[in-house]
């Protein structure tokens, strides 16, 4: 997505600011045609927007204010990466040549790979910058690392790495031959979304990598990879989603609806509060005639049980609590579930012996919690 801007700079494609879903927020430069969010660091986001005349400009958004970023005298500018006050990206000069740039909030500096006909800077971490260069704007296929003094080709077993998109510490992510990679300076690890035709790693922060994948129809889907698990993240209702950068619990990128791209911020949901749960009875006979299954829930001491949203409490994400009572003195929540519903669920699952039951819920502010207990399930009515 980042380097594809060289092909869309001439397009004339109106957006509104808003949100969709609890964790997704649309991010559009005011009054323009299209917006692309490419990089994030803290509260600062950089990217590009297409104005009503079809011209592409870079931008910086600090959570309140939008600032246009245009390299002096350039025809086209787009910002791709940010670290503190340093922003990197690329611009077209009046002759149609593509150059990389570094902007520190006051000074613009052209940074071109030595001898290259075109250069694009994609990611920055401290003084280290990654990007791609080529003979011209249509042959950007050689990844590089620049440390402020030295330019280094990113080669692995004699082959260029395609495109380097982002850097965090010693780790670099990018794309080569439709495959994503993570390179730590010594080892190259290929990263492919399971079953996808192509995968593009765009951003990295610690162990978390974001990007997009696609099947045969080439419609892109966003992904988050934590080093072990792949999670698809698609903007609700969008035809395509591309995740471009991650910093802490926030991800930025672009989504497509119709013929227009919008930027977005995605906030990674907080992990649930670990609650202590005690299920009563400890032994459940599937043929018993009791009325309730009672769960006693204890939250960590920094939370108040009075803040529990009673409508959000479920057993096994399937059976809602029929009755809830919160005791602020003991800081216990007592949730009662219809016994026949629980027994029917366990019967359908064929669960006997030691069974783990999980209780989930949310506080009034939306913070999730969960806890589990193990009970013994018997079927005394059967031989």
Image (spheres, rainbow, N blue to C red):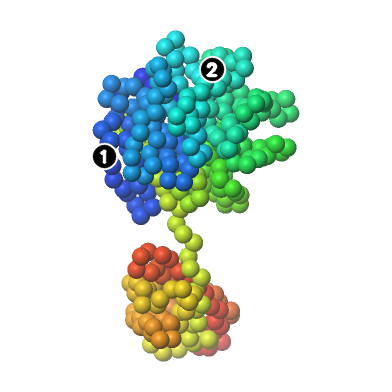
Q: Residue at x 35, y 47 (%)?
A: 25
As helix, strand or loop, the secondary structure at mark 1 comes to loop
Q: Residue at x 50, y 46 (%)?
A: 247
* Image: 247 above or below 92: below
Q: Residue at x 34, y 52 (%)?
A: 21
* Image: 302 above or below 383: above
- Decide: few, some or many residues near mark 2? Use Cα within 10 Å; few <14, some 14-19, many ≥20: many
Q: Position of residue 210 (x, y in %)?
A: 52, 43
Q: Position of residue 308 (x, y in %)?
A: 37, 73
Query: Image quadrant of residue 194?
Result: top right
**Quadrant (top left, top right, bottom left, bottom right) of the C terminus:** bottom right
Q: Residue at x 41, y 70 (%)?
A: 361
For disc 2, the marked residue is 118
Q: Residue furthest top?
A: 95
Q: Position of residue 274 (x, y in %)?
A: 51, 70
As helix, strand or loop, the secondary structure at mark 2 comes to strand
Q: CA distance from mark 2 to mark 1?
A: 34 Å
Query: Image quadrant of residue 22?
Result: bottom left
For disc 1, the marked residue is 16
């Amino acid at each position: 997505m980042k380097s594809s801007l060289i092909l869309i700079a001439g397009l004339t494609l109106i957006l509104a600011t808003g949100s969709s879903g609890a964790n997704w927020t649309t991010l559009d430069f005011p009054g323009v045609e299209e917006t692309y969010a490419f990089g994030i660091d803290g509260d600062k986001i950089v990217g590009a927007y297409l104005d009503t005349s079809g011209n592409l400009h870079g931008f910086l958004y600090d959570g309140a204010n939008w600032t246009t970023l245009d390299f002096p005298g350039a025809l086209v500018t787009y910002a791709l990466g940010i670290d503190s006050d340093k922003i990197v990206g690329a611009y077209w000069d009046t002759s149609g040549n593509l150059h990389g740039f570094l902007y520190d909030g006051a000074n613009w500096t052209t940074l071109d790979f030595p001898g290259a006909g075109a250069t694009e800077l994609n990611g920055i971490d401290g003084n280290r910058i990654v990007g791609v260069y080529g003979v011209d704007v249509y042959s950007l296929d050689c990844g590089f690392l620049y440390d402020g003094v030295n330019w280094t080709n990113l080669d692995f077993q004699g082959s260029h790495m395609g495109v380097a998109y982002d850097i965090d510490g010693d780790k670099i992510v990018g794309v080569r031959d439709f495959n994503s990679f993570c390179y730590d300076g010594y080892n190259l690890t290929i990263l492919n979304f399971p079953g996808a035709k192509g995968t593009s790693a765009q951003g990295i922060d610690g162990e978390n990598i974001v990007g997009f994948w696609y099947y045969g129809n080439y419609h892109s889907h966003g992904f988050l990879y934590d080093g072990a698990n792949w999670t698809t993240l698609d903007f609700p209702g969008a035809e395509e989603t591309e995740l471009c950068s991650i910093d802490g619990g926030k991800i930025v990128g672009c989504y497509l609806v119709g013929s227009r791209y919008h930027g977005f911020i995605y906030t990674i949901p907080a992990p649930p509060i670990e609650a202590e749960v005690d299920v009563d009875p400890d032994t459940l006979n599937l043929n018993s005639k009791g009325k309730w299954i009672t769960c006693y829930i204890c939250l960590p001491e920094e939370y108040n049980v009075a803040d529990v949203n009673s409508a959000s409490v479920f057993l096994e994400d399937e059976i809602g609590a029929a009755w809830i009572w919160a005791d602020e003195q003991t800081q216990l929540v007592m949730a009662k579930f219809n016994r026949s519903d629980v027994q029917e669920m366990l019967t359908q699952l064929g669960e006997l012996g030691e069974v783990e039951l999980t209780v989930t819920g949310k506080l009034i502010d939306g913070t999730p919690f969960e806890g589990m207990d193990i009970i013994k399930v018997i079927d005394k009515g059967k031989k």
